[in-house]
Image: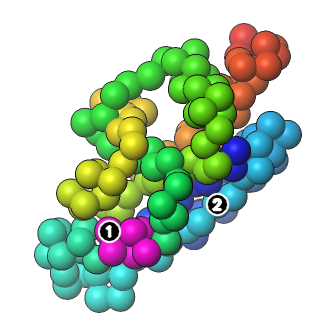
Amino acid sequence: MKIQFWSIGKSNESHVEEGIQLFTRRISNYYPVQWQIIPTPKNSGVMSEADLKQKEGEVIIGLLKKEDYLVVLDERGKQLSSEGLATFIQQRANESEKSIVFLIGGAFGVSATILERANFKWSLSQLVFPHQIVRMLLAEQIYRACSINRNEKYHHQ
């Protein structure tokens, strides 16, 4: 199973890049892992929120493969404990999913089309975080879940 992290927005800022790389390397000990930063559409500053989400959604749909298991990070999604996330990932592996795509949407979230396509909607927290921090937090939590599944000590350090 391959783990993919997709995020709409700018490249990683230097203050979070080191952490993202650290946890990405650690995840790669369990699963192949890949990041894809999807640039915001041109002229996004003059687009309405709805138009921007639609345009971003079209790009995402174009990148997704039919067999990709899409997890959309969404404030209205289901919250999971670290152990719950570990179980979730293990279940996907047990079901022989080829690829899990964790999607961090744009500034206004994702389009209805993407939410309908999602296999799972996940809320990291009721708090709002900057996208850059969400990337690192997401990578850390996926690494934590992998370490829980292998009964390794990281979770309780």
Q: Point out the residue furthest to the bottom here.
A: 43
Estimate the spatial distance between the alpha carbons at disc 2 and disc 1, rounded to whole Å. Answer: 18 Å
Q: Residue 84 location in percent, x, y?
A: 52, 18
Query: Is residue 133 at least partly visible in the picture?
Result: no
Query: Is residue 149 at least partly visible in the picture?
Result: yes
From which residue to which does the magenta span run? 56-62
Q: Is residue 140 above or below residue 82?
A: below
Label whose residue precedes the other's in the sequence (2 or 1) = 2
Instruction: Confirm or deny contact between disc 2 and disc 1 (CB under 8 A).
Output: no
Residue at left offset 39%, top offset 69%: 61
In the depicted view, which residue is nearer to us: 62 or 38? Answer: 62
Q: Assign the C terminus to one quadrant of the image.
A: top right
Which residue is label 2 attached to? 35
Q: Is residue 103 above or below residue 97?
A: below
Which residue is label 1 attached to? 57
Horizontally, is 81 left or right of 61 in the view? Answer: right
Residue 31 inside the magenta-drawn segment: no
Q: Assign the N terminus to one quadrant of the image.
A: top right
In the depicted view, which residue is nearer to us: 59 or 19? Answer: 59
Q: Point out the residue furthest to the right here.
A: 29
Residue at left offset 58%, top offset 54%: 5
In the depicted view, which residue is nearer to us: 59 or 142? Answer: 59
Q: Which mark is residue 127?
A: none
Q: Secondary structure at mark 2?
A: strand
Residue at left offset 18%, top offset 76%: 51
Residue kind at label 2, given as amino acid type:
Trp
Horizontally, is 151 left or right of 138 in the view? Answer: right
Magenta stretch: dominant secondary structure = helix
Quick one: label 1, few (<14), some, or many (20+) residues within 10 Å?
many
